Image (cartoon, rainbow, N blue to C red):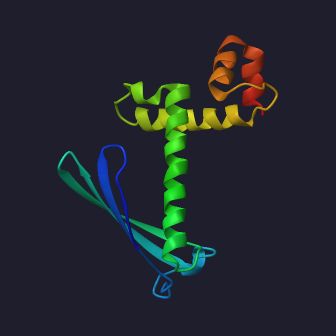
Protein backbone atom coordinates (compact mmCIF):
# COMPACT_ATOMS: atom_id res chain seq x y z
CA UNK A 1 0.00 0.00 0.00
CA UNK A 2 1.33 3.47 -0.88
CA UNK A 3 0.09 6.80 0.55
CA UNK A 4 1.28 10.21 -0.67
CA UNK A 5 0.75 13.32 1.48
CA UNK A 6 1.60 16.93 0.76
CA UNK A 7 1.30 18.81 4.05
CA UNK A 8 3.39 21.36 5.95
CA UNK A 9 5.57 22.23 2.95
CA UNK A 10 6.75 18.68 2.28
CA UNK A 11 5.85 15.75 0.09
CA UNK A 12 5.83 12.42 1.89
CA UNK A 13 5.36 8.98 0.36
CA UNK A 14 4.78 6.12 2.78
CA UNK A 15 4.93 2.47 1.69
CA UNK A 16 3.42 -0.16 3.98
CA UNK A 17 4.16 -3.88 4.09
CA UNK A 18 2.75 -6.32 6.63
CA UNK A 19 2.89 -10.11 6.98
CA UNK A 20 1.54 -12.74 9.33
CA UNK A 21 4.59 -14.95 8.67
CA UNK A 22 5.98 -14.78 12.22
CA UNK A 23 6.81 -18.47 12.74
CA UNK A 24 10.54 -17.82 12.35
CA UNK A 25 10.74 -15.41 15.30
CA UNK A 26 12.71 -16.80 18.24
CA UNK A 27 10.75 -16.70 21.53
CA UNK A 28 7.67 -15.35 19.75
CA UNK A 29 5.49 -16.67 22.62
CA UNK A 30 6.97 -13.89 24.79
CA UNK A 31 5.09 -11.37 22.60
CA UNK A 32 1.52 -12.07 23.72
CA UNK A 33 -0.94 -11.56 20.88
CA UNK A 34 1.77 -11.28 18.20
CA UNK A 35 0.10 -11.78 14.81
CA UNK A 36 2.12 -9.77 12.33
CA UNK A 37 5.23 -7.78 11.50
CA UNK A 38 5.05 -4.60 9.48
CA UNK A 39 7.38 -2.18 7.79
CA UNK A 40 6.90 1.45 6.78
CA UNK A 41 9.24 3.24 4.40
CA UNK A 42 8.83 7.03 4.45
CA UNK A 43 10.32 9.19 1.73
CA UNK A 44 10.18 12.91 2.49
CA UNK A 45 11.02 15.76 0.18
CA UNK A 46 11.49 19.09 1.93
CA UNK A 47 12.87 22.03 -0.05
CA UNK A 48 14.24 19.68 -2.71
CA UNK A 49 16.08 17.48 -0.21
CA UNK A 50 15.03 13.80 -0.08
CA UNK A 51 15.26 11.67 3.09
CA UNK A 52 14.26 8.02 3.53
CA UNK A 53 13.38 6.39 6.84
CA UNK A 54 12.39 2.76 7.47
CA UNK A 55 10.50 1.71 10.61
CA UNK A 56 9.52 -1.80 11.72
CA UNK A 57 6.58 -2.77 13.90
CA UNK A 58 5.31 -5.87 15.66
CA UNK A 59 1.56 -6.03 15.87
CA UNK A 60 -1.46 -7.86 17.22
CA UNK A 61 -3.54 -7.07 14.11
CA UNK A 62 -3.88 -9.24 11.05
CA UNK A 63 -2.02 -8.61 7.81
CA UNK A 64 -4.32 -5.91 6.44
CA UNK A 65 -2.33 -2.98 5.05
CA UNK A 66 -5.15 -0.46 5.53
CA UNK A 67 -5.58 -1.41 9.21
CA UNK A 68 -1.81 -1.34 9.62
CA UNK A 69 -1.47 2.12 8.05
CA UNK A 70 -4.23 3.50 10.32
CA UNK A 71 -2.58 1.94 13.41
CA UNK A 72 0.81 3.45 12.55
CA UNK A 73 -0.66 6.90 11.87
CA UNK A 74 -2.66 6.87 15.12
CA UNK A 75 0.48 5.83 17.04
CA UNK A 76 2.35 8.87 15.72
CA UNK A 77 -0.65 11.12 16.42
CA UNK A 78 -0.47 10.06 20.07
CA UNK A 79 3.32 10.57 20.16
CA UNK A 80 3.06 14.02 18.58
CA UNK A 81 0.26 15.15 20.92
CA UNK A 82 2.32 14.00 23.93
CA UNK A 83 5.26 16.06 22.68
CA UNK A 84 2.97 19.08 22.25
CA UNK A 85 1.68 18.77 25.84
CA UNK A 86 5.22 18.42 27.22
CA UNK A 87 6.27 21.50 25.29
CA UNK A 88 3.28 23.59 26.39
CA UNK A 89 3.29 22.50 30.05
CA UNK A 90 7.03 22.17 30.66
CA UNK A 91 8.51 24.21 27.75
CA UNK A 92 10.55 21.12 26.89
CA UNK A 93 11.72 22.50 23.54
CA UNK A 94 13.47 25.37 25.34
CA UNK A 95 15.39 23.10 27.72
CA UNK A 96 19.16 23.62 27.61
CA UNK A 97 19.99 20.54 29.66
CA UNK A 98 22.72 18.78 27.69
CA UNK A 99 25.38 17.13 29.88
CA UNK A 100 25.58 13.41 30.65
CA UNK A 101 22.24 11.73 31.23
CA UNK A 102 20.60 14.88 32.57
CA UNK A 103 18.36 15.43 29.51
CA UNK A 104 17.11 11.85 29.61
CA UNK A 105 16.59 11.98 33.39
CA UNK A 106 14.65 15.24 33.18
CA UNK A 107 12.53 13.82 30.36
CA UNK A 108 11.55 10.88 32.58
CA UNK A 109 10.79 13.27 35.46
CA UNK A 110 8.60 15.41 33.17
CA UNK A 111 6.67 12.32 32.01
CA UNK A 112 6.09 11.25 35.62
CA UNK A 113 4.97 14.77 36.56
CA UNK A 114 2.64 14.94 33.55
CA UNK A 115 1.06 11.59 34.45
CA UNK A 116 0.56 12.69 38.08
CA UNK A 117 -0.98 16.00 36.97
CA UNK A 118 -3.38 14.15 34.67
CA UNK A 119 -4.40 11.76 37.48
CA UNK A 120 -5.40 14.62 39.80
CA UNK A 121 -9.12 15.20 39.15
CA UNK A 122 -10.31 17.59 41.91
CA UNK A 123 -9.20 20.79 40.16
CA UNK A 124 -11.21 21.36 36.97
CA UNK A 125 -8.37 23.15 35.19
CA UNK A 126 -5.85 22.23 32.52
CA UNK A 127 -2.55 20.47 33.14
CA UNK A 128 -0.52 23.67 32.71
CA UNK A 129 -2.60 25.44 35.37
CA UNK A 130 -2.41 22.42 37.67
CA UNK A 131 1.38 22.69 37.46
CA UNK A 132 1.21 26.40 38.32
CA UNK A 133 -1.19 25.71 41.21
CA UNK A 134 1.17 23.02 42.54
CA UNK A 135 3.98 25.59 42.47
CA UNK A 136 1.91 28.01 44.54
CA UNK A 137 0.45 25.51 47.01
CA UNK A 138 2.42 22.86 48.85
CA UNK A 139 -0.87 21.23 49.91
CA UNK A 140 -1.98 20.88 46.30
CA UNK A 141 1.45 19.58 45.27
CA UNK A 142 1.22 16.98 48.03
CA UNK A 143 -2.25 15.98 46.77
CA UNK A 144 -0.80 15.44 43.28
CA UNK A 145 2.19 13.43 44.49
CA UNK A 146 0.07 11.21 46.74
CA UNK A 147 -2.59 10.50 44.07
Residue 50 in percent (x, y) is at 20, 55
Q: Which residue is drawn at 69% across and 16% down?
A: 133
Comparing 94 with 5, the one in front is: 5
In depth, the one of 46 and 122 nearer the eye is 46
Quarter holding the C terminus is top right
Q: Where is residue 81 in the image (x, y as percent from the top left)?
A: 54, 42
Q: Is residue 17 left or right of residue 23?
A: left
Image vertical order of residue 9 relative to residue 18, above or below = above
Furthest-left residue in this view: 48
Q: Does residue 22 sit above or below 13 in this rendering? A: below
Q: Is residue 90 above or below residue 79?
A: above
**Residue at left offset 41%, top offset 30%:** 93
In the rendered image, which quarter is residue 126 located in?
A: top right
- Residue 21 x/y as whole percent: 48, 86
Residue at the spot 63% in from the left edge and 75% down from the top edge:
33
Q: Residue furthest right?
A: 122
Q: Nearer the viewer, residue 125 or 44?
A: 44
Q: Residue at x 75, y 23 (%)?
A: 142
Query: On screen, 118 above or below 91?
Result: below
Where, quadrant-wise, is the N terminus in this rendering?
Answer: bottom left
Residue 105 lies, in percent from the top left, at 48, 36
Q: State which quadrant residue 39 falls in.
A: bottom left
Locate residue 4 relative to residue 140 in the image: left or right. left
Amino acid sequence: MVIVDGEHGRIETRKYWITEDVGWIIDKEKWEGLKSIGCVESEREIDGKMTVETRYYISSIGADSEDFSRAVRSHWTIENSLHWVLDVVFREDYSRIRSGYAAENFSVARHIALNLLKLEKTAKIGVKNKRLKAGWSNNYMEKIILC
